[in-house]
Each structure stands twice: as structure tokens, then as C-alpha cells.
Image (spheres, helix red, strand yellow):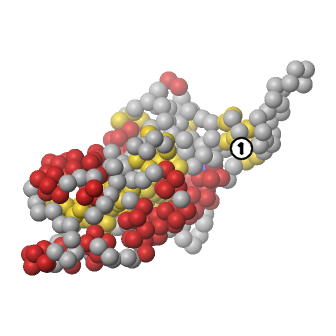
Amino acid sequence: MLADKRILLIIGGGIAAFKSLDLTRRLREQGAEVVPVLTRAGEEFVTPLSASALAAQKVYRDLFDLTDEAEMGHIELSRAADLVVVAPATADLMAKMANGLANDLASTLLMATDKRVLIAPAMNVRMWEHPATQRNLATLQGDGVLVVGPDEGAMACGEFGPGRMAEVPDIVAAVVAALSDGPLRGRHVLVTSGPTHEPIDPVRYIANRSSGAQGTALAAALRDLGAEVTFVTGPARVAPPAGVRVVKVETAREMLEAVQSALPADAAVFAAAVADWRVANATDRKMKKTEGEGTPALEFAENPDILKTVSRMGEGRPGLVVGFAAETHDVEANATAKRARKGCDWIVANDVSPATGIMGGSENKVAIVTAEGVEDWPRLSKEETARRLAARIAEALAR
Ligand code: C5P
């Protein structure tokens, strides 16, 4: 999948650097040529010899290495690549990139390149969550830098949380997506997915059975066609896909906010199962069961309708807005009415009555309701449904 692609791999100084050796192998297995660049700190974690042996290439380390300049200058080195990958991207490297520092070979290459840059951040949880890193991340994303990970989990430093470098197969998927010549290249597509959780008190919430499987498959399919995907997800059972920008939210109101700040987009697909109501009298303290006081009365307030808000936003509305309709009866009639009510362009309708096994299952059977009418699709895996839908979206945006 990466035949004839040349990847400049900048290996920063973090314990995750050892994974970049495996990354080198996996990228080469896909047919890519990998040109390794080691930062000074990177050399503390992997040796130039290992990086060079696995890449079957010279490893570049020093800006002032005249032999390198004679062979290939730093400008040329950064431009001869099809993609620049920084893995691990340390807090320090991200800070340099965000601020345009160029005081060593890696940072100079990053400033001099005219190619896309993909970073795989890896650092301690506190360092990742530090406002400075988050500011730098936002700056880099604004500059068009692609980001994969970090993952959440146990870290070498003994802490737990976000900061682990994305796993190698996920970085490879992000590289493939970044280099894809697919029809959605250069397009930004927003996808919402998963359920929302609406708190009752700090330990209880109201939710629904959405697994996030269809939204996740769709985000991956759009990514595979070359789209830049922003994936706004509630607490789903299925892990978000690699190679997309993931924004995690809990409630419907947070989801709306995340969607609005992710715009503009060329297309937006609302696959999330948003709770229609939230608990209006949710409390900050855990509700206590008190003998003889009976059961608490929950009051509900209506949540914002994200699909409707975006469909009717006028200026800045994505060119294509797609909603989902999970119905248990009269699917087509209800979906057609929903399309009109929401003001979206398409409704992807599915029958989620328990007999179909679709909710939480691996297959889906949908009907697409557009201005032209209703199209019935056969029962397919959620992945195949996603691929067909992504292809339809690409077709619509090409018109
Ligand atoms: O109104 P209903 O929930 O049936 O509509 C389903 C569609 O509307 C889905 O695309 C869903 O993501 C979207 N929706 C939304 N915000 C809500 C409720 C539904 O975006 N509050």
C-alpha cells in the first residue's frame, strides 16, 4: 500500500522510541522507503546502528555533518520525502514545532519541509495534559499537522492515562491514510458516534445501547478514502479508529460544542445516538437512599438537537449533512419525515427493532433517504455499509 513512498521518520527521545524500530519494519513491509532521523535524545533510547540497520538506510543525526550536506542537504532531505513522521513526538519536539524553532537537524527538517507531517505524541500523562502541550497541540493541528494517538494506559513511568504512543499498526494506518490518493483527499469530514451519557449525579447516568460500531467503521472508511476526519465520540464500547482526530465527549451539550468547534467541514455525518433528554435536576453530590424518604423524582430537560442545529445553521453549514434514523417501525416513512424535520440532506435509516439484531450487532441494513427518494441497501456488515456510504459521500462532494 505504500509502494514508492518515502517516509522521513524522526525518532524523538522517549521510551516509546523502541516502537519506532518496529514501525520502520512495518512501513517497509508495506513497500515504503524509510529514512531515519535520530534526535540527540532519541539516540539515548535507540542506537543509530539499529535505526539504520532496520531501515537499510543511512541514519541522519547532525545538522552540521558535512558529509550529509555533501550527499543531501537538509532542505532536500526534508522535501524528497512524501511524508514526515515524528514518532515518538516528545513534548519538547511538539513545542519546537509549534513555535518554529530550528536548532537541530530534526526541528530544521520540520521547518524546511513542504510535505505533510504526522506526529505520534508520547509523554508522561501530566506533560500531555499540561496546558502548554495542549496549546502546542492545538497550534499544530491548526497548522495542518496530523496526529495519531496518544493512547491511554499504563505508562513506563508508572502512571496511568493518555500519553502512551499509539500502537505501531495504528501509526501505519495513519500513514496509509495520510498518503492516500483517495477521492476525499483534502476534504474535512466530521463524524459523531457512540452514545451520550447524561449525569444524574456524579456516579449515575442515563445512556443508551449504542456501541459506536457504525460510526467508527464510517470514520475509518472516510479516512481510507483520504479524508481528514474529526471523530466526535461519546463513551462508546468500540475503540475509535486510528488516523483520525478524536474528540471525546460525555454529554449531548459537550458533543454540540465539540461539533461546532470542529467546523468548518465539507461533510458532517451524525451517527451518534444522542440522548434526547438530560436530567434537569442532576446533583453535584451523590443522591442518598434515605429510609422512609421514598424515591427521587428526576426531571428532564430537552437536549440540543445537534443534527438539526448544524443542518439549519445557514452560513458555514457543511455542504453535505447526513443524519441517521434508528427506527423500530415504519422505517421509510419515519425517516422521510425526519429528513424534512431536521433539514439534513440525507438520512441513513435502519431498523433497530430487537428482532433484527442490528443494535450492538455486526451487521446493518439501511435505506438512504435523499431528495431523490429512498434507496434500499442489502443487509451488509457495518464495515461494508460504511465503505459504500463513504463512497457515496465522496461522489456527492465531487459534484
Ligand atoms: O431525532 P432522532 O434522535 O431520531 O434523530 C436521529 C439523528 O439525529 C441522528 O443522526 C442523531 O445523531 C441526530 N441527533 C442529534 N442530536 C440529538 C438527537 C439526535 O444530532 N439531540
**Extreme right residue here?**
292
- Residue 187, given in percent of the width and then of the height, sits at 38, 65
Closer to us: 262 or 81: 81
**Extreme front residue here?**
44
Res. 62 in view: yes
**Residue annotated with mark 1:** 278
Q: Residue drawn 35% across and 36% down?
A: 380
Closer to us: 65 or 220: 65
Q: Residue drawn 19% across and 61% down?
A: 36
Amino acid tagged 1 = Arg
Closer to us: 99 or 173: 99
Answer with left or right where residue 298 lies relative to residue 334: right
Quadrant location, the C terminus: bottom left
- Residue 51, given in percent of the width and then of the height, sits at 17, 55
Answer with left or right where residue 336 lies relative to residue 109: right
Answer with left or right where residue 32 lies relative to residue 235: left
Dot 1 beta carbon under 8 Å from ligand 1: no
The residue tagged with tag 1: helix, strand or loop? strand
- Residue 382, given in percent of the width and then of the height, sits at 38, 38
Answer with left or right where residue 318 lies relative to residue 50: right
Q: Residue drawn 54% across and 29% down?
A: 353
Mark 1 Cα-neighbour bin, 10 Å: few <14, some 14–19, many ≥20 = many
Q: Residue drawn 36% across and 59% down?
A: 89
**Extreme top residue here?**
291
